[in-house]
Image: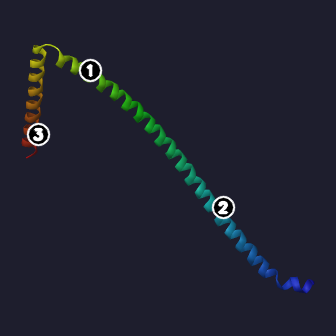
């Protein structure tokens, strides 16, 4: 039996070396996958925090817009003088918009 094991010692060493090399490759791949999983988890947490902040910002904007709509509705329902002022302000804003558009287009040429 001793003679049979002596001839296979080199093959066993080669197989052990191959197994060690493959184990090292596996450790490197598992480490990389662990790192990727950690990065994905961190990115998901960041995105969830971003979405939560966006939700609160939308709620704030909704409150602001609903308050503005209520005040606008109150002004429209009020007397004739307020409607006239609203009309003048609206026309003035449109004119300012076109004036700014004209000036910006002249500057860019």
Q: Of the residues tagged 1 and 3, which is closer to the observer?
A: 1
Query: Residue visible at 36% across and 32% down?
Result: 58
Q: Of the residues tagged 2 and 1, which is closer to the observer?
A: 1
Q: Secondary structure at mark 3?
A: helix
Residue 56 position in % (x across, y down): 41, 30
Q: Secondary structure at mark 2?
A: helix
> Which residue is labeled 3 in the image?
104
Residue 73 position in % (x across, y down): 22, 20
Dot 2: few (<14), some (14–19), or many (≥20) neighbours within 10 Å?
A: few
Dot 3: few (<14), some (14–19), or many (≥20) neighbours within 10 Å?
A: few
> Which residue is labeled 2 in the image?
27
Apparent side of residue 71 relative to residue 14 in the rendered image (left or right): left
Quadrant the N terminus occupies: bottom right
Query: Residue visible at 38% across and 29% down?
Result: 59
Q: Secondary structure at mark 1?
A: helix
Can you tell which quarter of the image residue 57 is in?
top left
């Amino acid at each position: 039996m001793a003679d049979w094991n002596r001839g296979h010692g080199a093959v066993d060493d080669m197989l052990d070396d191959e197994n060690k090399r493959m184990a090292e490759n596996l450790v490197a791949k598992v480490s990389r996958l662990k790192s990727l999983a950690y990065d994905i988890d961190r990115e998901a947490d960041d995105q969830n925090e971003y979405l939560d902040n966006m939700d609160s910002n939308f709620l704030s904007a909704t409150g602001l817009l609903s308050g503005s709509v209520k005040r606008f509705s109150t002004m429209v329902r009020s007397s004739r003088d307020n409607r006239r002022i609203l009309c003048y302000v609206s026309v003035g804003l449109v004119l300012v918009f076109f004036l700014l558009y004209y000036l910006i287009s002249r500057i860019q040429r």
